[in-house]
Amino acid sequence: MHLIDTHVHLNFEAFQPDLNEIAQRWRECGIVRLVHSCVTPSEFHAIQALAQRFPELYFAVGLHPMDMEQWTTDTANRIRALAQSDSKVVAIGETGLDLFKAQDQAEQELSLWAHLQIAKDLGLPVILHCRDAAQPMADLLRRFWAQQGPVTGVMHCWSGTPEETQMFLDLGFYVSFSGIVTFKNAAQVHASAQMVSCDRILIETDCPFLTPEPKRKQRRNEPANVYHVAEKVAKLRNVSLETLASETTANACRLFQLPVPTESATLIHT
């Protein structure tokens, strides 16, 4: 049984002391592909080095919406050039809108539009961060579709309502669930996880953040814990863990154009 963690941040300092042991644990629990997100283009070469170190790791390039102070007139050109420089770049992002206490919505929307244009031009999906911004993001995506044509991508670490979930499903996006889905009080996330079609659902850790149950006491999340995300989503959807793993792995390979795993992998409880 294979699993794919579609959103990690392994370049963060928290992972540096024992990254080889972390990799061993993700391999032992059947994780055969990982997609490393990018918060800022300045991370690119560090993430690239990780992708060279771990063959199963692929990555994205982009600028997070909470880092708009780094956006300049040349940022889009830099993201485009970096994306074209390495065949292991499989997405643009993470980008999106974060309107929680934000005062820079116009700047975020400008950046998001530029990311979408790069993704469309290069035939890559986008990794979208969306916080307190579902309707503005859906509106912007519809405008982009009308003017430039559709793009594909994933609503990462999704925590929206079922109604918001449907907006992005209607736009052709995949929806990825993180450790939040394992939290007891995450009722609307549970409802969303139940409604996403089997060909659009993904799983992730967003590590080192959002450690799932039953590992909440461990402050640092890690890829091996995507097992617990998969386990909870399978339970919510009333399917076997094997079925959920097969569906999410196939979906991740299709969205990110990843090599379909053929090697054997043993899944153990972590």
Image (cartoon, rainbow, N blue to C red):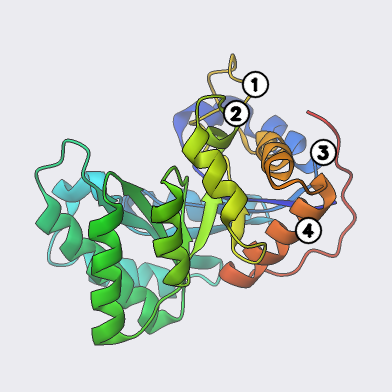
Mark 4 sits on what residue? Answer: 246
Mark 1 sits on what residue? Answer: 215
Q: Amino acid at mark 2?
A: Pro
Q: Nearer the viewer, residue 83 or 168?
A: 168
Residue 248: quadrant of the picture: bottom right
In the rendering, which numbered label is found on residue 212? 2
In space, the residues marked 1 and 2 are separated at their CA atoms by: 6 Å
Pointers 1 and 2 in contact (C-beta within 8 Å) = yes
Q: Which residue is found at the position 69% from the left and 37% from the top?
A: 232
Q: Nearer the viewer, mark 3 or mark 1?
A: 1
Q: Residue 48 location, x and y as percent? A: 50, 56
Q: Amino acid at mark 4?
A: Ser
Q: Nearer the viewer, mark 2 or mark 3?
A: 2
| Residue 153 horizontal side relative to residue 79, left or right | right
Residue 148 drawn above or below residue 101 = below
Other-residue count near label 1 (Cα within 10 Å), few / some / many at <14 / 14–19 / ≥20: some
Q: Secondary structure at mark 2?
A: loop
Q: Residue 201 location, x and y as percent? A: 61, 57
Residue 27 drawn above or below residue 77 = above
Q: Nearer the viewer, residue 49 or 229?
A: 229
Q: Nearer the viewer, residue 57 or 151?
A: 151
Q: Which residue is found at the position 26% from the left and 50% from the top?
A: 133
Q: Earlier in the sequence, mark 3 or mark 1?
A: 3
Q: Residue 76 location, x and y as percent? A: 24, 68
In space, the residues marked 4 and 3 are separated at their CA atoms by: 17 Å
Q: Which residue is found at the position 85% from the left and 65% from the top?
A: 262
Q: Earlier in the sequence, mark 4 or mark 3?
A: 3
| Residue 197 horizontal side relative to residue 245, left or right | left
In space, the residues marked 2 and 3 are separated at their CA atoms by: 18 Å
